[in-house]
């Protein structure tokens, strides 16, 4: 049961080397071993998207990934977005605040990480493209309208920032 | 001292509110978007153990033996809890009516699939789950009680043997001369409806960390608690502890909607802590546990209902017979949810007389719990569907039929037959505005065109009243005595003029911390940035309830205004003393305590607080050096119900009309929402962004309940839903982006004129969707009278007809 394995990985720019049980999920590893609690767990079966993180730039479900599968990976979690020194929010985070894109906020890190991937690939998405990208994230509070507004606002701001 | 709670924002001590009424950013959000909020599973305590629970695979069975010795021997396992411990240490939970409660682990027999049977505490959740696999439980199967008919059949097996029956409660309510009115009606429209179980499913499940202090015999529980004090009292009773030895520390929650449960998980973790020598024990419910047996299932209802109608469309009477499958007991207060419709039984209409026949039944399904709205969503679906049937029979437009029956603006305050008093409203104006917003005439034209092409397009126009600010008196007739639900806050000003508001509840998503900060900042004339809102644990908090019953935004506003008024009075005395004036000559305005007739003479809030805390020599006699005030708010003017349940229960009556256009795909049965329009009136909008978020979130849950979500059980009471693959929570693709507008008819009786607004949309959306679906089906002579109107259900309806 408890085969242990050493993994090396980078999370939010910081390198870690840890010995983990082979069966440990990446979500549990991030949350409870690295104390990065922003990656939330809403279902543990890959449906809700609350645990979405970026592994080597691609969105992934931390609940369906084993920590050992992340050996050698470069991971970004929601904690990696805010400016480390000033605490200033990432433009996507700020857009969610300004457009009231959250209520309880439990789903929000997942939506923000999915949005980060989307806007990296497609800086000016249409509403349909945004919905397509966010279709794998559940929110029980907002009814998605303000989330759609938040993503639009983030896209606009990021675009005008990169144009400037 | 008398206290002034302003019912209008122009009564605040400021020339213009800077925050109230504006969609200011929420103070809770920067931490939430950063992922740094301490949801309960983010917390670890030194020496903490982890709990896993073995649950019953059977709906009804006697437990004949449990062998947990191998599990206990597994390295890392610290304690195993069984029904024997529970029988020794625990009582069944409180219920209403009394005596239909389970203990946290099954004792002797199991009553539903997913009922906890054995619990383990181990050094990790992984090991705790390993241990579950080593436990042997022997069962002797009993015949399940699968549904209310089976439950009420003579000789039915009993879910609770000691009760001698499966009927938890059965009674009728008669309001007015119902028989005469039905006899005099020109037309009676009646139908049966089936509302299948749905549930809350917040994205965060329940979780807690409990620690039993063996020296002191006291208990501390940290967790996702929605109603902390209520939870503390319940735990004290079930765990046989003095209430002042149970401390609940409520953490921010990832949604609640009433359905967070908590009593069972808390009691189990508490007893495991007791059994493992006082180490803290964490229990995090997983989604499968939540879906099987968590605190989120709601409304499993069979309706038989009728309207009495005059030839001109006047609706005169409404009769409802409800049989509600409560599941295995009343532990979740599902009973209350069947009584709540009394607060707005006849909706927006001047219906003279009504009758309610209510039967609550125990079966071997999971127990039901509260879910947002707490009863009216199915009730309104019944009433509004019958209104549409009446409109069809009379060949009247459904909007027109509703308009003819609305309570008129000059009739408020209006007492409905079931006893509650509506404070204010203008229903016809709301209808007019939404019909204009939706371009109703154009919608009907596109519908006619679509029908000509053979497409199934329908429109729903549905009006509802949202009873806001609940009171216990609404539920007296199902076994909850009492009048008045307290909500207490403490407002404290520090020596630098910063303000701290201590409340008894924690975040759940509705933005109440922000509303609290808006109100206190406008009253005291300080910046919102200098306000901190914090949660007090139950051992020190003032009497409070927390979220529930579309109440907290209004209640916390009232409590803050009361506390601020107390502070104002004290500040006036202090300033009068140092300025050698009378307190009556001093006023608070725009953050300054100043001479009424010479406003240039005065002090800021910070200066007064600083003086009080550091210059006791300057204080007037009898004033403490304490620039703080507490206030516990209750709804004004509530009373005890009569024998038919009639009382002034909910303080406010918001209202809304939704217009929705749908198309049913003949090939798949799938409903597509073509357009969704809402006009609502919840009085003063303290933070319009919060209100719109509540509306849209309620629409999403209404779409789920109306079209997709269902806790499916097989005929043997086995749940067929255990993951989000089976239980279909709407995604961004299913939820319409609604077009909204609003009117404002302030409440004349509530703080700042605000009405409860957290539940209105889920009260309305399922009814609006079903009415639209039946409008689409009308040319085929078909009706759907069961929710959810899922693709499968509609396909079958269409297919069986063909
Ligand atoms: S927790 Fe990973 S998808 Fe739900
Ligand atoms: S904000 Fe609560 S689940 Fe999305």
Image: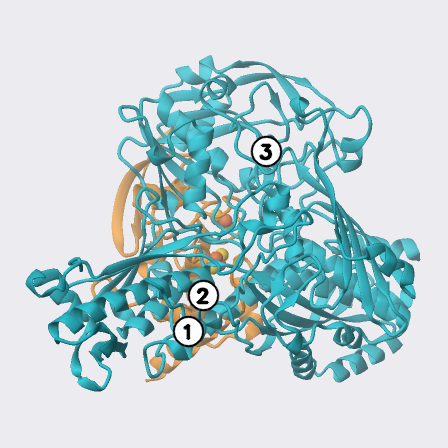
Chain colours: A orange, B cyan
**How far from the left and from the top, in percent, is residue B111?**
64, 27
Distance in Å between CA atoms under marks 1 and 3: 53 Å
Q: Are marks 2 and 1 in contact (CB under 8 Å)?
A: yes
**Foreground of the two, B361 or B284:** B361
Q: Are marks 1 and 3 on the same chain?
A: no
Q: Along the horizontal axis of the image, is B109 left or right of B35?
A: right
Distance in Å between CA atoms under marks 2 and 1: 9 Å
Q: Looking at the image, is mark 2 or mark 1 earlier in the sequence?
A: 2
Q: Are marks 3 and 2 in contact (CB under 8 Å)?
A: no
Dot 1 falls on a residue whose secondary structure is: helix
Question: Label 1: which residue?
Answer: A154
User: Is residue B763 depicted above or below B683 in this figure?
Assistant: above
Please indicate, yes or no, whether residue B76 appears anywhere in the rendered image.
no
**Foreground of the two, B293 or B135:** B293
Question: Label 2: which residue?
Answer: A115
Please indicate, yes or no, whether residue B690 appears anywhere in the rendered image.
yes
């Amino acid at each position: 049961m408890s085969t242990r394995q050493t993994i090396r990985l980078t999370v939010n720019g910081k390198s870690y080397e840890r010995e983990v049980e082979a069966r440990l999920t990446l979500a549990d590893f991030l949350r409870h071993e690295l104390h990065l609690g922003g990656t939330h767990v809403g279902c543990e079966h890959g449906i809700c998207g609350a645990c979405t993180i970026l592994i080597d730039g691609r969105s992934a479900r931390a609940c369906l990934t084993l920590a050992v599968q992340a050996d050698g990976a470069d991971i970004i979690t929601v904690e990696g977005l805010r400016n480390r020194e000033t605490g200033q929010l990432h433009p996507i985070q700020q857009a969610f605040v300004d457009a009231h894109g959250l209520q309880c906020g439990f789903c929000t890190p997942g939506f923000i990480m999915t949005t980060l991937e989307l806007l990296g690939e497609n800086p000016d998405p249409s509403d349909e493209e945004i919905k397509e990208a966010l279709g794998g994230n559940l929110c029980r509070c907002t009814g998605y309208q303000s989330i759609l507004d938040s993503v639009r606002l983030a896209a606009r701001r990021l675009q005008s920032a990169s144009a400037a | 001292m008398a206290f002034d709670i302003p019912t209008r924002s122009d009564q605040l001590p400021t020339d213009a509110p800077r925050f109230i009424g504006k969609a200011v950013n929420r103070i809770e959000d920067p931490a939430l978007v950063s992922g740094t909020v301490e949801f309960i599973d983010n917390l670890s305590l030194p020496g903490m153990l982890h709990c896993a629970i073995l649950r019953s695979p059977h709906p009804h069975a006697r437990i004949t033996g449990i062998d947990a010795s191998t599990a206990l021997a597994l390295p890392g396992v610290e304690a195993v809890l069984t029904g024997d411990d529970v029988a020794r240490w625990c009582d069944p939970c409180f219920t209403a009516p009394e005596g239909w409660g389970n203990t946290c682990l099954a004792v002797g027999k199991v009553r539903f699939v997913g009922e906890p049977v054995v619990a383990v505490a181990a050094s990790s959740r992984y090991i705790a789950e390993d241990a579950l696999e080593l436990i042997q439980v022997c069962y002797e199967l009993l015949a399940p009680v699968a549904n209310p008919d089976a439950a009420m059949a003579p000789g039915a097996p009993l879910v609770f043997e000691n009760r001698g029956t499966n009927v938890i409660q059965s009674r009728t309510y008669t309001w007015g001369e119902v028989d005469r009115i039905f006899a005099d009606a020109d037309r009676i429209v009646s139908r049966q409806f089936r509302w299948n179980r749905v549930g809350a499913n917040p994205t965060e499940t329940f979780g807690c960390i409990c620690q039993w202090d063996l020296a002191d015999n006291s208990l501390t529980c940290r967790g996702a608690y929605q109603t902390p004090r209520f939870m503390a009292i319940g735990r004290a009773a079930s765990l046989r502890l003095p209430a002042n030895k149970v401390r609940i520390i409520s953490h921010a929650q990832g949604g609640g909607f009433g359905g967070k449960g908590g009593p069972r998980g808390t009691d189990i973790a508490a007893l495991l802590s007791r059994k493992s020598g006082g180490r803290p024990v964490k229990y995090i419910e997983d989604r499968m546990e939540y879906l099987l047996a968590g605190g989120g299932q709601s409304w499993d209802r069979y309706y038989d209902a009728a309207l009495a109608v005059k030839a001109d469309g006047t609706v005169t009477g409404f009769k409802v017979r409800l049989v509600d499958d409560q599941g295995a007991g009343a532990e979740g207060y599902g009973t209350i949810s069947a009584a709540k419709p009394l607060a707005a039984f006849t909706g927006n209409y001047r219906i003279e007389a009504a009758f309610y026949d209510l039967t609550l039944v125990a079966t071997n399904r999971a127990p039901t719990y509260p879910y947002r709205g707490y009863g009216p969503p199915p009730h309104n679906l019944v009433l509004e569907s019958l209104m549409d049937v009446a409109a069809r029979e009379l060949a009247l437009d459904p909007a027109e039929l509703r308009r003819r029956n609305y309570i008129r603006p000059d009739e408020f305050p209006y007492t409905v037959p079931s006893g509650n008093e509506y404070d204010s409203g203008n229903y016809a104006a709301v209808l007019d505005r939404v019909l204009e917003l939706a371009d109703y005439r154009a919608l009907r034209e596109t519908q006619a065109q679509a029908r000509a092409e053979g497409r199934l397009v329908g429109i729903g126009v549905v009006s509802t009243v949202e009873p806001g600010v609940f009171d216990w008196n609404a539920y007296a007739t199902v076994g909850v005595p009492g009048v008045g639900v307290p909500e207490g806050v403490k407002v404290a000003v520090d020596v630098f003029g910063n303000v701290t508001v201590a409340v008894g509840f924690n975040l759940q998503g509705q933005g109440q911390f922000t509303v609290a900060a808006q109100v206190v900042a406008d009253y005291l004339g300080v910046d919102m940035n200098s306000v901190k809102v914090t949660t007090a644990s139950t051992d020190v908090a003032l009497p409070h309830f927390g979220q529930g019953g579309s109440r907290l935004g209004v209640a916390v506003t009232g409590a803050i205004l009361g506390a601020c008024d107390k502070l104002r009075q004290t500040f006036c005395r202090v300033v009068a003393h140092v300025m050698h004036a009378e307190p009556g000559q001093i006023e608070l305005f725009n953050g300054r305590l100043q001479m009424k007739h010479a406003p240039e003479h005065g002090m800021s809030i910070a200066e007064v607080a600083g003086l009080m805390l550091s210059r006791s020599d300057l204080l007037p006699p009898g004033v403490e050096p304490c620039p703080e005030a507490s206030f516990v708010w209750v709804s004004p003017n509530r009373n005890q119900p009569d024998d038919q349940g009639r009382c002034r229960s909910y303080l406010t009556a918001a209202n809304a009309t939704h217009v929705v256009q749908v198309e049913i795909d003949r090939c798949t049965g799938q409903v597509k929402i073509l357009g969704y329009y809402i006009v609502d009136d919840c009085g003063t909008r303290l933070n319009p962004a919060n209100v719109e978020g509540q509306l849209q979130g309620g629409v999403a849950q209404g779409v789920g309940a109306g079209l997709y979500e269902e806790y499916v059980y097989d005929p043997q009471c086995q749940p067929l839903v255990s993951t989000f693959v089976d239980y279909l929570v709407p995604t961004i693709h299913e939820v319409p982006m609604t077009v909204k507008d609003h009117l404002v008819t302030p409440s004349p009786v509530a703080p700042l004129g605000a009405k409860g607004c957290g539940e209105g949309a889920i009260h309305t959306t399922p009814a609006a969707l079903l009415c639209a679906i039946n409008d689409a089906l009308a040319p085929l002579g078909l009706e759907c009278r069961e929710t959810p109107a899922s693709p499968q259900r509609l396909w079958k309806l269409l297919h069986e007809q063909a």
